[in-house]
Amino acid sequence: MYVGVTSNLPKLIVEHKEKRYQDSFSSRYNLCKLVYYEQFQNIVDAIAREKQLKAGSRIKKLKLINDFNSEWKDLFEDIQS
């Protein structure tokens, strides 16, 4: 799983899908599917949430994803519209 912060989610997803950065974590582990996201108005809040998620267990992340997107559908198309 990849947890990160961006100001342009659609652009970041395209970069992951196209594996633009060959030595990146997402490219190395073939992470190119958006299954969960949160939006924030304030970057400080977004970074705080990122740190909270990264510090959490894999089980907590799986529960968060399953509660939000139980089918693990790629949500990239949803954020495009």
Image: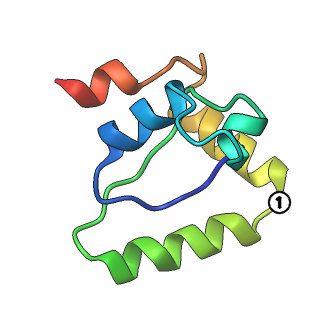
Residue 53 is left or right of residue 6, and the answer is: right
Front residue of 39 and 32: 32
Q: Secondary structure at mark 1?
A: loop
> Which one is in front, 29 or 44?
29
Relative image position of residue 13 (x, y in whole percent): 43, 35
The amino acid on which the numbered mark 1 sits, given as a three-letter code, is Ser
Assign the C terminus to one quadrant of the image.
top left
Q: Is residue 18 above or below residue 21?
A: above
**Relative image position of residue 22 (x, y in whole percent):** 66, 39
Read off the residue under disc 1. 57
- Which x, y percent locates residue 64? 62, 46
Other-residue count near label 1 (Cα within 10 Å), few / some / many at <14 / 14–19 / ≥20: few
> Which residue corresponds to the image point at 32% horizontal and 40% vertical from the top-left?
11
Identity of the residue drawn at 58% across and 36% down: 67
Residue occupying the point 71% across, 28% down: 30
Residue at figure coordinates x 22%, y 26% from the top left: 80
Percent of width and height locating residue 7: 29, 59
